[in-house]
Amino acid sequence: MTSLPASDKSATQFAESVLASQSVFRSVMNALARPGAIQTISALIERPQLLMPATAAVALALFDHDTPVWADAAFCAEPEIANWLRFQTGAPLVAAASAAAFALVSCASALLDFEHFAQGTPEYPDRSATLIVQADTLTEGPELILSGPGIQGTSSLRAGALPPDFAKRMQANGALFPQGVDLLLVCGAELVALPRSTHVAAKEA
């Protein structure tokens, strides 16, 4: 997966920036270690309205001047978001999704095919993208069955507004392992991780 720097940022919107950043970083790592398990982020952050609380918190905790960031068209249409990201994180914003270490997706239904993002290389699989995807819900969408490292047997996820072929995309992504992208799905102050090692299947009717 993409390296996740836990750098301290003195000019953030966290009420207690260092402790809050460390707490968010732990939540992300816990989510990656337990795919499908929902984590709740409690940090209070002043942010542009279109950014969900968990999206903003992850950005403050993980982005820095060494992590190029791509944002989708809906985010780019709001200049306040680019200004906030530059000021709060120092991360460079890039026009090409393939050049980004992190990608911000405003709505799960607008998620591009994974081939648009950095997949890493056989020698450097960590040079891949982590996608931060805002979803309508993490509890009421069509059921997905998850299995793989960090999951005992199987678990389920009901994220809303994902593309209809999302399970097939994740299966193709997993087939590239150790290359491939990692996903953080967020809704409000909650997040769930789907690393490339997780097998995702649509529940059969």
Image: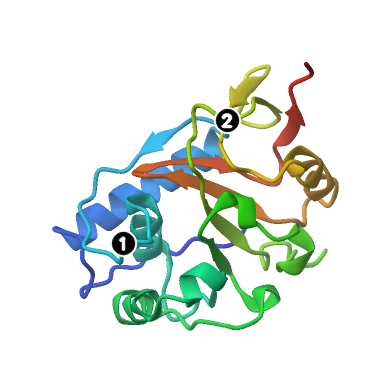
> Which quadrant holds residue 143?
top right
| Position in image of residue 101 (x %, y %) | 59, 70
> Which quadrant holds residue 110?
bottom right
Q: Circle 1 — which element?
A: loop
> Which quadrant holds residue 168?
top right
Q: Which mark is residue 93?
A: none
Left or right placement of residue 100 versus residue 4 in this view: right
**At x 43% / y 81%, what residue is drawn?**
65
Q: Circle 2 — which element?
A: loop
Task: Compare residues 177 and 112 and report the one nearer the observer.
Answer: 112
Look at label 2 and name its amino acid: Gly
Q: Is residue 177 visible to us here?
A: yes
Left or right placement of residue 39 versus residue 42 in this view: right
Look at label 1 and name its amino acid: Gln
Left or right placement of residue 155 versus residue 44 in this view: right
- 138 vs 89: above or below: above
**At x 51% / y 45%, what residue is drawn?**
135
Left or right placement of residue 98 versus residue 136 in this view: right
| Color scheme of the displayed model | rainbow
Q: Which residue is mark 1?
A: 49
- 157 vs 165: above or below: above
| Position in image of residue 35 (x %, y %) | 57, 34
| Position in image of residue 130 (x %, y %) | 59, 59
Q: Which residue is mark 2?
A: 141
